Amino acid sequence: MTTVCSAQKIDLRKEFGCEQLIIVTSADWQAIQGKMNVYEWKDNSWNAVMKNIPITLGRTGLAWAKGLQNSKWNTGELKKEGDGKSPAGIFRIGGLFGYGDLETKMNYLKLNQTTFCVDDTASSNYNRIVDTATVSKNWNSAEKMRRNDDLYKYGVLVDYNSENVIEGAGSCIFIHIWRGNDQPTLGCTAMTEANILKLIHFLNKEKKPLLVQMPEKELQEFSKEYKLPSH
């Protein structure tokens, strides 16, 4: 499948250098389930690489969040810390993480028992992944990254609220392995281990991958302003 986008719209390739695109959609703002379609720009077209992959979202669905999209889209209830919502918008993919060694074309963080993601809004390390072996603790709340389950065995870092960090806007947003197809996350996007392995082996930092995530109806409106592949 290939699609060619209209010339009048904002081009994610020209604007951000993006040649790999992850599009996640749901039925509505409250849905905890959805689908993922993945594309790569080749031969002057967006080519589908993964199609209609089942995913789960935050336990309370989605909310607009500060991303690369025009700020006019950020209306209504916005993403905030602890709301159980996955962020909606356009976001860079910041790298990968996991429990073991991994051959990849992305920056990769191997997790250990001292790796944490700080979600304490009062900490200067808010929304940062830190190693307590080298960083002094200045937080009261943080997520242990080397979990006792396999949810973070393989994961993708979503570059959300990481530049000019807004206190309380949300933290520790990932794409990771799900608990099950009817089990929501705390604000991340999740899928089967097999599908996340396909995704992480596909991603290439040289192609500046982006995540576009929102309900289907909003994506249709979004597509009137941004060049996106049909799916």
Image (cartoon, grey):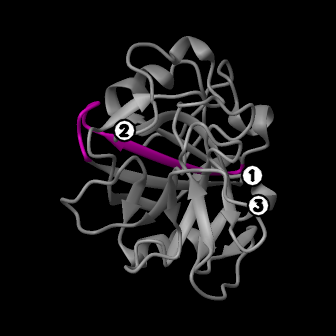
Query: Element under label 2?
Result: loop
Identify whether 176 is placed above or below 222.
below
Using the image, tell me which numbered label, if any, was put on residue 205.
Answer: 3
> Residue 216's spot in the image, x, y percent?
34, 33
Provide the residue span drawn in magenta: 19-32
Query: Element under label 3?
Result: helix
Calculate the distance from the C-alpha at mark 1 to the C-alpha at mark 2: 25 Å
> Residue 90's spot in the image, x, y percent?
58, 35
Residue 197 located within the stretch drawn in magenta: no
Identify whether 147 is placed above or below 103.
above
Query: Element under label 1?
Result: loop
Using the image, tell me which numbered label, if any, was put on residue 140.
Answer: none
Dot 2 or dot 3, earlier in sequence: 2
User: For this rendering, which residue is in front, 167 or 28?
Assistant: 167
Q: Which amino acid type is marked by label 3?
A: Lys
* Residue located beneath label 2 in the image: 85
Residue 26 located within the stretch drawn in magenta: yes
**Residue lying farthest to the left in this orientation:** 182
Q: Which amino acid type is marked by label 1?
A: Lys
> Label 1 near label 3: C-beta < 8 Å?
yes
User: For this rendering, which residue is in front, 46 or 21?
Assistant: 21
> Residue 35's spot in the image, x, y percent?
34, 51
> Residue 159's spot in the image, x, y percent?
65, 46
Q: Is residue 1 visible?
A: no
* Residue located beneath label 1 in the image: 208
Q: Residues within 10 Å of mark 1 (few under 14, many from 20)?
A: some
Q: Residue at x 60, y 30 (%)?
A: 167
Dot 1 or dot 2, earlier in sequence: 2
Identify whether 107 is placed above or below 207.
below
